[in-house]
Image (cartoon, rainbow, N blue to C red):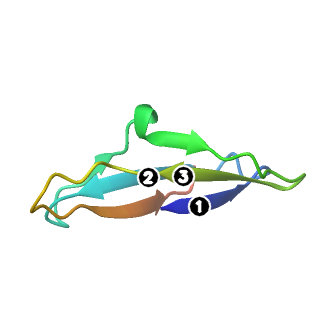
């Protein structure tokens, strides 16, 4: 999946995660992350993807948290 991040929102961590059961979530590793080239002055765009083994399902989500 692709998501866009505002460059001024560095205090709001966004963590792509994946799961095979929608209960246990793990972070997408940096090897599976690509920064796309169409940044503008306010945002940057990322792509997170995971290889899906045959006969399996992988769910992806973006966990957004607020720093204290």
Q: Which residue is drawn at 42% across and 32% down?
A: 31
Which of the 4 quarters of the picture holds residue 3? bottom right
Hey, which residue is sitting farthest front in the picture? 54
The answer to whether residue 36 is left or right of residue 13 is right
Mark 2 Cα-neighbour bin, 10 Å: few <14, some 14–19, many ≥20? many
Q: Name the one closer to the observer, 55 or 59.
A: 55
Hey, which residue is sitting farthest right in the picture? 41
Instruction: Inspect this view and state whether residue 12 appears.
Output: no
Q: In this view, does 9 lie above or below 61?
A: above
Which mark identifies residue 19? Answer: none
Mark sitting earlier along the chain (2/1): 1
Mark 1 Cα-neighbour bin, 10 Å: few <14, some 14–19, many ≥20? some
Label 3 secondary element: strand
Check disc 3 and report the residue beneath it. 47
Marks 2 and 1 in Cβ contact (< 8 Å) = yes
Check disc 1 and report the residue beneath it. 3
Hey, which residue is sitting farthest left in the picture? 55
Mark 3 Cα-neighbour bin, 10 Å: few <14, some 14–19, many ≥20? some
Q: Residue at x 45, y 34 (%)?
A: 30
The answer to whether residue 56 is left or right of residue 41 is left
Q: Distance between the residues labelled 1 and 3?
A: 7 Å
> Mark 3 or mark 2, which is nearer to you?
3
Q: Name the one closer to the observer, 52 or 61.
A: 52
Mark sitting earlier along the chain (1/3): 1
Q: Where is residue 32 in the image (x, y as percent from the top left)?
A: 42, 40
Check disc 2 and report the residue beneath it. 16
Q: How far apart are marks 3 and 2 (CA)?
A: 9 Å
């Amino acid at each position: 999946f692709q998501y866009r991040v505002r460059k001024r929102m560095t205090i709001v961590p966004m963590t792509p995660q994946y799961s095979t059961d929608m209960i246990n979530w793990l972070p997408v590793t940096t090897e599976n992350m690509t920064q796309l080239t169409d940044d503008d002055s306010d945002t940057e765009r990322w792509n997170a993807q995971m290889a899906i083994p045959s006969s399996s399902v992988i769910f992806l989500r973006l966990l957004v948290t607020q720093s204290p």
